[in-house]
Image (tube, grey):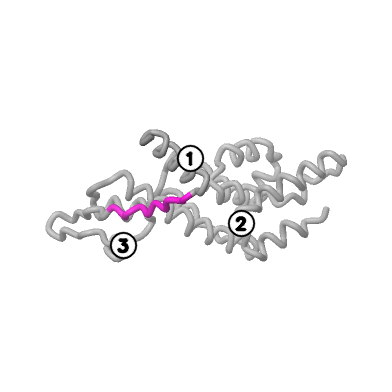
């Protein structure tokens, strides 16, 4: 089986396309009747879904993986462990699942990229959900120790109250770009002209 498109996506760090390439290759192999289960990169396929936050598809892929592979390939089980933590919204567990496995050379960059994207996603979640939060909870959500988490969020403009060990969330201004469409402007001009005359 030719995994060149998948290898190219991994080399180019196009991790958002990994799951799609895997899906296409799997469908092609199934349509041609080629047995692929033994050599299929299940860990990469699961991690591709996880990277794009498609936990449902990862869950269905996990259910379709033969039990011999689930039991025999630790990296596949480790990838699904991340998926399980995402499924149950165990935010700190996701970080632990990423850190507590020795990933292969092929999956390590994908896992590192996921960890970065996941941390950014959780930070945005904290921004929208909290006005104040404890240092301990912030560290738990971000998967960092308390000192690193405090430095990170203070660097993002949050305010630290050392006495209460609480952080005040600084909401970031959302830049809204208005697009001026000439057709809309023309219709508005005609409407105003009609109203005036």
Tell me the distance, in whole angstroms, between the alpha carbons under discs 3 and 2. 27 Å
Q: Which of 25 and 61 is in front in this view?
A: 25
**Residue 132 on image: x %, y %:** 22, 49
- Residue at image mark 1: 187
Give residue 101's position: percent from left, percent from top. 53, 57
Q: Does the magenta stretch include residue 178?
A: yes
The residue that appears at 55% across and 41% down in the rendered structure is 55
Direction from residue 174 to residue 100 in the image, left or right: right
Q: Label 2, label 1: how many angstroms apart (C-alpha)?
A: 43 Å
Kindly identify which residue carries mark 2: 15
The reply to whether discs 3 and 2 touch (Cβ–Cβ < 8 Å) is: no
> In what element is the residue under mark 1?
helix
Identify the secondary structure beneath mark 2: helix
Residue closer to the observer: 77 or 119:
119
Q: Which tag is nearer the camera, tag 2 or tag 1? A: 1
Q: In which quarter of the image is the C terminus?
A: top left
Q: How far apart are marks 1 and 3 (CA)?
A: 43 Å
Does the magenta stretch mainly form a helix, a strand or a loop? loop
| Residue 188, placed above or below residue 148 | above
Residue 191 coordinates in the image, percent (x, y): 43, 36
Residue furthest left in the image: 163
Q: Nearer the viewer, mark 1 or mark 3?
A: 1
Q: In this view, does 112 lie above or below 28?
A: below
Mark number for residue 156?
Answer: 3
């Amino acid at each position: 089986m030719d995994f060149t498109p998948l290898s190219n996506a991994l080399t180019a760090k196009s991790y958002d396309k990994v799951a799609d390439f895997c899906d296409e290759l799997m469908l092609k192999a199934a349509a041609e009747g080629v047995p692929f289960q033994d050599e299929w990169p299940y860990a990469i396929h699961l991690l591709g879904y996880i990277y794009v936050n498609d936990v449902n598809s990862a869950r269905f892929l996990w259910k379709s993986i033969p039990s011999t592979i689930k039991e025999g390939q630790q990296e596949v089980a480790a990838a699904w462990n991340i998926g399980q933590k995402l499924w149950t919204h165990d935010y700190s567990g996701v970080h632990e699942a990423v850190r507590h496995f020795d990933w292969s050379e092929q999956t390590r960059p994908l896992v590192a990229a996921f960890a970065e994207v996941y941390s950014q996603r959780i930070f945005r979640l904290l921004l929208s959900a909290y006005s104040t939060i404890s240092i301990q909870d912030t560290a738990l959500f971000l998967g960092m120790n308390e000192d690193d988490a405090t430095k990170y969020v203070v660097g993002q403009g949050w305010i630290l109250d050392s006495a209460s060990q609480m952080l005040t969330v600084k909401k970031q201004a959302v830049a809204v770009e208005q697009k001026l469409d000439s057709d809309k402007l023309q219709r508005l001009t005609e409407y105003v002209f009609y109203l005036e005359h």
